[in-house]
Amino acid sequence: MKHITIILVFLFTSLSFGQLTKKSATLFFNNGDSLKCFARVSGANVRYAKTKKGKETKINYKELDHIEYLNKDDLTKVYFIKEKGKSKPPKLMQLVTNGAVQVYCVVSGSTNNPSFITYKRAKEKMSLKSYIIHYFIKRKGDKEVVRISRHFKNNMISFFNDCKELVSNIKDEKKGFHKKDIVNIVEFYNTECK
């Protein structure tokens, strides 16, 4: 039991480390202001400084609209969003697709470089099976996201019930959309089902 506890603590620390390292970021506040800085997420707080080793200022996530991280050529927008039906605090999620319906994700996995794992990087490395992408969707303006991995087909049919063509495509087991096509499903909805 002691070995399992040590392994779980190590795994949790490795997966969480990306949120503890200060990264070059732009904070977008609810009042419309923005700030280029170095930031890290620590629970419900964001700590930021003007320089990587500078003195940190702590703010609550509720003061922010979102954070943008520039990781090489990859601009990643992250939001604190609550999952529908959960009493837990909001999760830090990456925006994958924006439109009338939005796709968000949380990437987890093991890596030798425990830094912030972007959606784009995880998709490129999926063949290594070292990352797990958890998808969430919501309609623009909704405050909570719906996790789509559970009861995929029924959830998608219910969520997109205002688009008969898409529902028909989801129901078609052979030629239709499947769970792995969530980004394509939302893009189809955003372009074809207005």
Image (tube, rainbow, N blue to C red):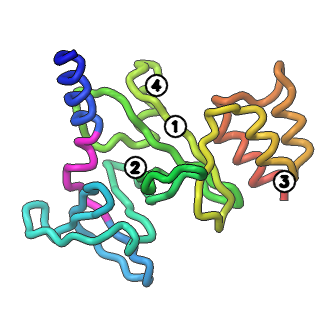
| Disc 1 target residue | 134
183 and 42: which is toward the camera: 42
The numbered mark at residue 126 is 4
Pointer 2: residues within 10 angstroms few (<14), some, or many (20+)?
few
Amino acid type shown at disc 1: His
Marks 3 and 1, how far apart in space? 25 Å
Pointer 1: residues within 10 angstroms few (<14), some, or many (20+)?
some
Q: Return the x and y of residue 62 as percentages of the image width and height.
A: 40, 71
Marks 4 and 2, how far apart in space? 17 Å
Image depth: mark 4 or mark 2 in front: 4
| Contact between labelled residues 3 and 4, with CB atoms less than 8 Å apart | no
Marks 4 and 1, how far apart in space? 13 Å
In the displayed structure image, the side of residue 109 where residue 142 appears, left or right: right
Q: Earlier in the sequence, mark 3 or mark 1?
A: 1
| Contact between labelled residues 1 and 2, with CB atoms less than 8 Å apart | no
Name the quarter where the C terminus is drawn: bottom right
Q: Residue at x 76, y 32 (%)?
A: 153
Q: Secondary structure at mark 1?
A: strand
133 and 5: which is toward the camera: 5
Pointer 4: residues within 10 angstroms few (<14), some, or many (20+)?
few
The numbered mark at residue 149 is none
Amino acid type shown at disc 4: Met
Q: Earlier in the sequence, mark 4 or mark 2?
A: 2
40 and 83: which is toward the camera: 83
Image depth: mark 3 or mark 2 in front: 3
The numbered mark at residue 74 is 2
Image depth: mark 3 or mark 1 in front: 1
Whether residue 94 is visible to the viewer of this picture, yes or no, is: yes
| Disc 3 target residue | 193
Amino acid type shown at disc 2: Asp
Pointer 3: residues within 10 angstroms few (<14), some, or many (20+)?
some
